Image (tube, rainbow, N blue to C red):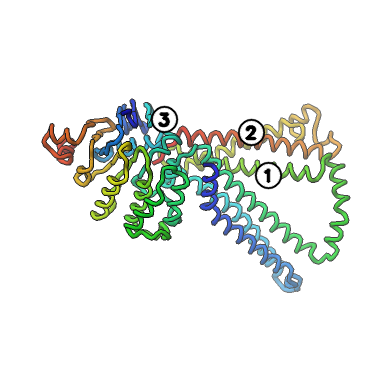
């Protein structure tokens, strides 16, 4: 099966600081991939470049054969690590908004997930807690039938019960032709759902391999392997 | 997609400028009621000072409303594209052109509407202050209006309706130009590694200076304005027979330059969003 995304020689520099350095990566279809690395390793920079929020200094990104643009944005569902929704909007208005702009958005799925988390449809976003806002964002993103889901720290700010729900949501709501790229520090919480891991250090690709291979080859969990690789 | 963007931009945008315009209408109504009252005719000490203060605060209110809408145009553009909200705006499956145009249309409509409300407010107060006691005002106005139209055509060389149309086009284009100056300054401010808002202010001042220089070169180069080039070529205010021969070409030059400047600024704003986006 052809690759979902191809990244070649990708570099992002901020003055003399290089955040992503000549990175080459192929993202296959139908996989849940953990994008892992210590703070400042370049994970979010890479994610932002894939989503067209940062302009690369050099290199190329192709998603379904297109560089980041309207065509790729229609096929990528992105959850940033910050609240990007306008706080004055009601939850139901946000659902309308997503439905208006994303052809692959499933309204029924969104309302079903909102109901199961007891999030009132008519509540204004600014009246909700930070954790609930994050859940609303995740629900909106996961209610799409995108080709690539990119979730930047999706479980960092929520309680363990919500964390389980989120992970369940992620597993249940993607199809086998889609891939999910998850960036997180909470490796032990997510490693059971991962198919592959990408380790990044200093903006460079350190490892990209299936989780099973890590377990077989090194006899360690991903979490333990990560701690070994990135030991301070 | 442009239609959808415009719809949502309108929904998110309208509340603040609508509140500002409602405030203007209230201030105008209070002004009309106040001016129409016999209070100002009383012969008491300090009434002139009070009237002066009232006019001062009215002008202040009008200026604050106009500036308020302009500031809101800038804040909305910056916040929705270059802050956290930009993570959604810039990941929608739309082009940079559609984003800029949807915001430009919305801002333009509210800027023009505010300008219209300000004009109506000033005219209403002037009418109340000077002409409302003249019971024959509207009768005289209607009676003399055809003569005015005739005189206007003779003096200007074009009909009054055509002149109004040109004036409207000029107003629309100069408003678009003013908005695009803000958009471009915000976009170029993003080139600064830190203090991007301060950077946008600097770019705005830079743009203002550059366009002032270009405008003064154009007006001096034009014999129509009576500038130095006009004198050099032996044509100036004084060599024309009617005011229309000066105002009409000046209006056309203003329309043309606003169009060119706006197009240039628009392409910079779009280019920056399409090819130089770097969200923090």
Left or right of A55, for residue A158: left
* Quarter occupied by residue A55: top left
Q: Position of residue B170 (x, y in %)?
A: 69, 42
Residue marked by disc 1 = B171
Q: Position of residue B143 (x, y in %)?
A: 88, 56
Badge 1 marks a residue whose secondary structure is helix
Residue at point 41%, 35% (across, down): A72
Q: Looking at the picture, tell me which residue is in the foreground, A52 or A139.
A: A139
Front: mark 2 or 3: 3
Q: Looking at the picture, tell me which residue is in the foreground, B167 or A117.
A: A117
Residue at point 53%, 40% (across, down): B100
What crowding class fits label 3: few (fewer than 14 Cα within 10 Å), some (14-19), or many (20 or more)?
few
Residue marked by disc 3 = A66
Residue at point 60%, 46% (across, down): B108
Left or right of B111, for residue A140: left
Figure quadrant of the C terminus of chain A:
top left
Figure quadrant of the N terminus of chain A:
top left
Marks 2, 1 in one chain: yes
Q: How far is disc 2 from disc 3 in space, using C-alphas?
A: 33 Å
What crowding class fits label 2: few (fewer than 14 Cα within 10 Å), some (14-19), or many (20 or more)?
some
Residue marked by disc 2 = B260
Left or right of B16, for residue B125: right
What crowding class fits label 1: few (fewer than 14 Cα within 10 Å), some (14-19), or many (20 or more)?
some
Q: Position of residue B156 (x, y in %)?
A: 83, 41
Marks 1, 3 in one chain: no
Q: How far is disc 2 from disc 1 in space, using C-alphas?
A: 15 Å
CB within 8 Å, label 2 to label 3? no
Q: Position of residue A230 (x, y in %)?
A: 19, 37
* Quarter occupied by residue B25: bottom right
Q: Is residue A64 above or below residue A222?
A: above
Front: mark 1 or 3: 3
Q: Is residue B193 above or below residue A170?
A: above
């Amino acid at each position: 099966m052809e690759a979902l995304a191809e990244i070649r020689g990708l570099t992002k520099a901020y003055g003399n600081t290089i955040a992503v350095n000549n990175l080459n990566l192929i993202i296959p279809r139908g996989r849940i991939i953990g994008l892992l690395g210590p703070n400042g390793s370049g994970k979010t920079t890479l994610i932002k470049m894939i989503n067209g929020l940062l302009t690369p200094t050099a290199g190329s990104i192709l998603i379904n054969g297109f560089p980041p643009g309207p065509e790729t944005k229609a096929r990528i569902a992105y959850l940033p690590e910050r609240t990007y929704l306008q706080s004055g909007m009601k939850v139901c208005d946000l659902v309308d908004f997503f439905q208006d702009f994303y052809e692959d958005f499933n309204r029924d799925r969104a309302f079903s997930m909102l109901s199961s988390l007891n999030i009132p449809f008519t509540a204004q976003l600014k009246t909700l807690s930070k954790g609930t806002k994050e859940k609303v964002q995740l629900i909106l993103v996961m209610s799409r039938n995108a080709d690539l889901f990119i979730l930047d720290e999706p479980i960092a700010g929520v309680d363990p019960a919500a964390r389980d729900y989120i992970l369940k949501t992620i597993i249940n709501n993607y199809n086998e032709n889609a891939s999910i790229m998850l960036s997180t520090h909470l490796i032990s919480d997510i490693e059971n759902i991962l198919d592959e891991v990408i380790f990044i250090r200093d903006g460079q690709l350190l490892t990209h391999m299936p989780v099973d291979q890590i377990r077989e080859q090194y006899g360690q969990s991903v979490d333990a392997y990560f701690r070994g690789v990135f030991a301070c | 997609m442009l239609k959808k963007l415009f719809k949502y931009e309108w929904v998110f945008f309208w509340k603040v400028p609508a509140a500002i315009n409602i405030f203007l209408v209230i201030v105008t109504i209070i002004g009309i009621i106040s001016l129409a009252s016999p209070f100002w005719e009383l012969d008491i000490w300090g009434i002139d000072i009070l009237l002066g203060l009232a006019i001062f605060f009215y002008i202040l209110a009008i200026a604050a409303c106009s500036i308020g809408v302009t500031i809101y145009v800038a804040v909305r553009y910056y916040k929705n594209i270059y802050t956290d909200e930009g993570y959604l705006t810039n990941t929608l499956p739309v082009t940079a052109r559609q984003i800029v145009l949807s915001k430009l249309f919305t801002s333009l409509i509210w800027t023009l509407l505010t300008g219209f409300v300000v004009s109506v407010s000033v005219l209403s107060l002037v009418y109340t202050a000077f002409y409302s006691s003249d019971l024959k005002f509207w009768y005289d106005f209607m009676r003399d209006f055809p003569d005015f139209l005739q005189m206007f055509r003779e003096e200007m060389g074009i009909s009054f309706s055509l002149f109004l149309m040109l004036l409207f086009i000029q107003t629309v284009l100069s408003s678009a130009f003013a908005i695009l100056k803000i958009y471009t300054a915000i976009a170029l401010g993003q080139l600064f590694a830190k203090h991007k808002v301060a950077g946008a202010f600097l770019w705005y001042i830079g743009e203002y200076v550059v366009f002032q220089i270009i405008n003064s070169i154009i007006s001096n180069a034009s014999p129509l304005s009576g500038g130095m080039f006009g004198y050099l070529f032996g044509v100036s205010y004084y060599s024309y027979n009617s005011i229309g021969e000066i105002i009409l070409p000046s209006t056309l030059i203003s329309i043309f330059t606003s169009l060119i400047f706006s197009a240039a600024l628009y392409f910079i704003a779009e280019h920056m969003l399409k090819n130089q986006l770097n969200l923090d």
